[in-house]
């Protein structure tokens, strides 16, 4: 099993500035699953050699544009440029069925999939040997859903966008990895999302093997996310990594750095360009406005 972070940014400012990519992440096991294809999911997948035509399942947690913008594109890729019926969509109800006369995935693209299933909190669906159990969120798309994914004997959790509520972390008990959408740094929280303060509470309940922080907002351009990852690790005792675009976690061989679950330390290889890109992002971010992340 392998997790490849395609785009570790989130929020409205990141969405248009692209300090970090916003393409979500991919889980590769006996089936490949792309999670939350925001803007850049397609180009980011190609950049990190994650062929989208080989995806078996597309997961879209909710209808906000930083999670679903590239969903139609990814379906084009999954279905051989829409020439054959293939692949599955597992998603929040607002994505599968539409909401308020909005529909993030066209009916045309839905028709090209073998199946499209709405996932709701507390229920499970199974497709191509992958089991998704929906996890409850508190977010301004009320159908937004996270998951516990089970494949090849492993459990991976994804919070999606949520604010903290008591017990939210208990849904992820037993996960080897937990991807946490931590939009905001410490002392800078907003409604509907996690910040470092509330992520600590969630992770303290969940106690996963390791945490990957993703969906990091523009405020993390000025404040390195590694600082808050360290705060979370110290407060919870859980190994916590601030995701960077292209980071790869897991047990399978890769030409990129691979972070093992057990130690989350660099194992092999060196991804070229990461550090340079981060430095460039910091420069650009000096003038950015970090407010206005709501509804993302
Ligand atoms: Zn959202």
Image (cartoon, rainbow, N blue to C red):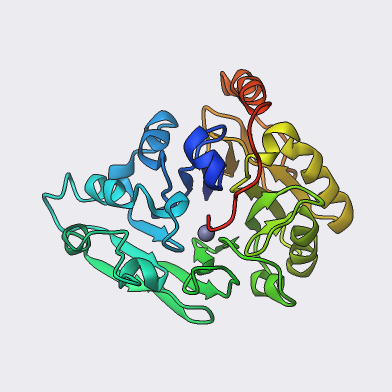
Q: Position of residue 83 (x, y in %)?
A: 11, 49
Q: Nearer the viewer, residue 288 or 84?
A: 288
Residue 114 found in image quarter: bottom left
Q: Is residue 11 above or below residue 85?
A: above
x, y percent for residue 238: 80, 55
Q: Residue at x 65, y 27 (%)?
A: 287
x and y percent of residue 140 in the render?
54, 68
Q: Is residue 146 visible?
A: yes
The image quarter containing residue 237 is: bottom right
Name the residue furthest bottom: 122
Q: Could you tell me how many numbered marks the image carries?
A: 0
Residue most extreme to the left? 83
Where on the picture, by quarter, is residue 285?
top right
Q: Nearer the viewer, residue 295 or 247?
A: 295
Q: Is residue 7 shown to the viewer in this render?
A: no
Drawn side of residue 266 relative to residue 234, left or right: left
The residue located at (68%, 73%) in the rendering is 168
Residue 213 position within the rendered picture, expressed as x and y whole percent measured from the top left: 66, 48
Outermost residue on the right side: it is: 234
Residue at 33% x, 43% y is 52
Between residue 136 and residue 56, name the one nearer to us.
Answer: 136
* 274 sits left or right of 170 in the view: left
């Amino acid at each position: 099993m392998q997790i490849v972070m395609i785009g570790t940014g989130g929020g409205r400012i990141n969405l248009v500035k692209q300090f970090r990519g916003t393409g979500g992440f991919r889980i590769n096991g006996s089936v490949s699953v792309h999670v939350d294809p925001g803007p850049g999911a397609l180009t980011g997948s190609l950049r990190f050699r994650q062929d989208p035509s080989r995806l078996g399942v597309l997961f879209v947690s909710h209808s906000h544009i930083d999670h679903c913008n590239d969903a139609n594109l990814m379906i084009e890729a999954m279905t051989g440029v829409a020439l054959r019926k293939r692949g599955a969509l597992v998603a929040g109800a607002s994505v599968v069925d539409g909401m308020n006369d909005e529909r993030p995935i066209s009916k045309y693209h839905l028709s090209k999939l073998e199946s499209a299933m709405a996932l709701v909190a507390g229920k499970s669906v199974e497709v191509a040997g992958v089991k998704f159990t929906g996890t409850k969120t508190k977010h301004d798309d009320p159908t937004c859903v996270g998951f516990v994914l089970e494949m090849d004997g492993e459990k991976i959790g994804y919070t999606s966008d949520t604010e903290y509520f008591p017990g939210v972390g208990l849904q992820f008990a037993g996960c080897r990895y937990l991807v946490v959408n931590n939009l905001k740094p410490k002392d800078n929280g907003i409604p509907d999302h996690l910040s470092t303060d509330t992520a600590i509470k969630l992770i303290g309940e969940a106690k996963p093997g390791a945490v990957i922080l993703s969906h990091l907002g523009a405020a993390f351009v000025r404040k390195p996310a590694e600082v808050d990852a360290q705060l979370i690790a110290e407060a919870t005792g859980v190994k916590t990594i601030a995701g960077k675009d292209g980071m790869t976690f897991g047990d399978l061989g890769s030409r990129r750095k691979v972070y093992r679950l057990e130690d989350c330390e660099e194992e092999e290889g060196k991804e070229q360009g990461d550090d340079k890109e981060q430095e460039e992002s910091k420069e650009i971010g000096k003038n950015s406005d970090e407010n206005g992340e709501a509804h993302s």
